[in-house]
Image (spheres, rainbow, N blue to C red):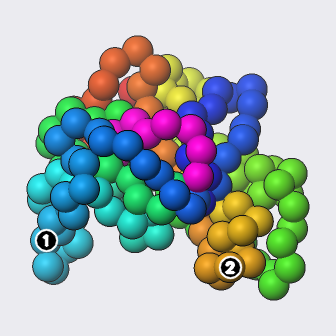
């Protein structure tokens, strides 16, 4: 899957190999509650294991297989607010993947955040499949992540209406 922050005016993204140490998360697997699957201790998690409500620390742009996640009660940069799969066997192309991300992520924003994308100071960006992850890993999932460009976040954005 490729990871990249975006503005509302541009979309690019998708994941295969993140390297480098990130404060507090480097190399240590994240701990999750056995029943709720909520992140209980910061660490690295497979980008393919992300769930709606997961909170992440910013990562460099590019391809990745792991992403740093933290409990949403801690300071974080992004929260997964929606996830969906694309249909089809053949790679649809970068443009089609980006278009699906824009259309769906913006449409689903208000349901999680509690305010429309047009009325908020929050921004969003997607994690999308790459052609290599689509063909090699059967990766079809797009994750929609919200963030505040002005400040790190503490506490879930679910229903925050900000």
Task: Give the label, 1 or 2, closer to the camera.
Answer: 2
Quarter of the C terminus within the rendering:
top left
- What's the magenta region? 55-63
Task: Give residue 136's mark.
Answer: 2
Task: Identify which residue is drawn at 77% across, 50% down.
Answer: 98
Give 19 or 95, whichever is nearer the viewer: 19
- Is the C-beta separation of discs 1 and 2 under 8 Å? no
Q: Residues within 10 Å of mark 1 (few under 14, many from 20)?
A: few
Task: Identify which residue is drawn at 49% across, 37% down.
Answer: 60
The x and y percentages for residue 121 are: 49, 20
Where residue 153 sits, quadrant-wise, is top left
Quarter of the N terminus within the rendering:
bottom right
Where residue 161 sits, quadrant-wise, is top left
Is residue 126 something one can see in this rendering? no
Report which residue position mark 1 lands on. 33
Task: Give residue 5's mark.
Answer: none
Any magenta on residue 92? no
Tell me if 1 is positioned left or right of 112 in this view: right
Tell me if 85 is positioned left or right of 73 in this view: right
The x and y percentages for residue 116 are: 56, 35
Task: Identify which residue is drawn at 39% across, 53% down.
Answer: 67
The x and y percentages for residue 132 are: 72, 68
Instruction: Determine the secondary structure under disc 1.
Output: loop
Q: Earlier in the sequence, mark 1 or mark 2?
A: 1
Give 126 or 160, whichever is nearer the viewer: 126
The x and y percentages for residue 124 are: 55, 37
Residue extending furthest top? 150
């Amino acid at each position: 899957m490729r990871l990249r922050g975006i503005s509302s005016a541009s979309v690019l993204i998708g994941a295969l190999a993140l390297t480098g140490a990130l404060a507090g998360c480097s190399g240590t697997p994240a701990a999750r509650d056995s029943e709720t699957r909520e992140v209980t201790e910061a660490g690295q998690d497979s980008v393919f294991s992300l769930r709606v409500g997961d909170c992440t620390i910013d990562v460099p742009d590019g391809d990745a297989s792991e992403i740093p996640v933290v409990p949403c009660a801690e300071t974080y940069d992004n929260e997964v607010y929606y996830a969906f799969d694309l249909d089809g066997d053949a790679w649809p192309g970068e443009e089609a993947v980006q278009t699906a991300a824009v259309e769906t992520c913006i449409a689903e924003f208000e349901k999680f955040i509690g305010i429309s994308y047009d009325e908020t100071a929050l921004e969003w960006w997607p994690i999308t499949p790459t052609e290599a992850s689509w063909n090699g890993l059967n990766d079809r999932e797009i994750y929609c992540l919200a963030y505040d460009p002005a400040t790190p976040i503490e506490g879930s954005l679910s229903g925050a209406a900000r």
